Image (cartoon, rainbow, N blue to C red):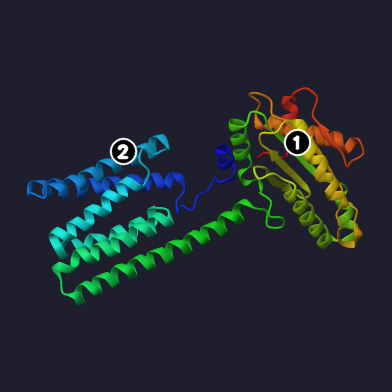
Amino acid sequence: MGKKYKLQAKHTDAILDIRRQKQVLKFVAATTLIFFVPIGINNILIGEIMLGAILLTFEITLLLEVTAIVYKRKGFFGHTLPLILLVTSVIMAIHIFGTLATYWVFPIIISVVFLLPIKLALSANVVLLIGCTLAALPHQHLATTSRYAFSLLATAVIAHVIVQAIKRLQKELRYLSERDSLTGALNRHDLQEHLENVCANYPISSVALIDIDNFKKINDQYGHDVGDKVIKQVVGVMYRHMEESDLLFRLGGDEFLLVLPDRDQFAAKNTMIYTGQHVEQSEYPEQAKVTISSGVAQLVNKESVEDWVKRADIALYQSKHNGRNKVSLYSGPLPSNKEKETSKFLI
């Protein structure tokens, strides 16, 4: 399911975000255009037609790929074709010109590590290391070529280690910025964006606003440490009964929003009834009795996310009004402008 990927795999393992990736790609394209086109033309003029043709073909494919990514968000060829042409041209240049061409390999190794996915970068650098070493060997003493190969290996290893450390740090920081520290549920940071994504990709979808019943009494009676444990345990129950595409947000305190893509209100209601039963049946610290109330609203065509969430809010109020530990569907008119202004769930 491609759309499910859009919802949950918002971030890749790239170091840069989309905007900065485009800026870097523009810089790379401009830099290679300045250096590689003259070199390619010069190689053709001095008789190295094959090498010159490969360099120019690389530049053309790179420019087409960058242009497609920057303006259409999708490339023509992917990374593979330009990378193959680049690696081939570098090895050929060393084979033809010897030591003079070996210095180009170092910035290429580093750039490959920073710009490409790890597996592709690793494969490319292995080929570069072996191919460039073999191509340089006829032009140098064995000891010189060995030192060259070792320096290439050291450059590649250091670049890979640094990039992976940066990616791990970014992943941790991203998790902290998107997740509630107590429960691990998503926080409100990207709530609006996720809801808009669901509206665009899943015209039949539902949201459920969830509230832990009488949570203040639990805090007052047993203390906030027990209250925190209860919240964590309730979230754990909800996660165990969510589908992979569902998104759970903690809005604050004991209030949560569950997004159920590609499910109508009746399927969402059944999910919440089932989840509520398991919440009630679970054992909690101090034998606390815990239930949840929820309000479910299905997306209406051309409806704003504010209206959608507000209708779930009204349905949640109905559940509380009916005695709590209930699941209610919104069945009234669209919320008025005044009601929309009172919604506390969207920033």
Disc 1 versus disc 2: distance between alpha carbons? 45 Å
Residue 157 appears in which quarter of the rendering? bottom left
Which residue shows up at 18% across the image and 60% down it?
Answer: 94
**Sequence-wise first label, 1 or 2:** 2
Q: Quadrant of residue 77?
A: top left
| Residue assigned mark 2 | 64
Judge the density around disc 1: few (<14), some (14-19), many (≥20) Cα neighbours within 10 Å. Answer: many
Q: What is the x, y in percent for residue 258?
A: 72, 42
Q: Nearer the viewer, residue 181 or 14?
A: 14
Task: Find residue 230 and report its horizontal and vertical position in percent.
Answer: 82, 56
Q: Which quadrant does the C terminus fall into?
A: top right
Q: Quadrant of the N terminus?
A: top right
Write down the quadrant of residue 138 in the picture: bottom left
Answer above or below: position of 219 versus 58.
below
Find disc 1 in the rendering and name its residue: 268
140 relative to 273, above or below: below
Secondary structure beneath dot 2 equals helix
Q: Residue at x 80, y 45 (%)?
A: 275
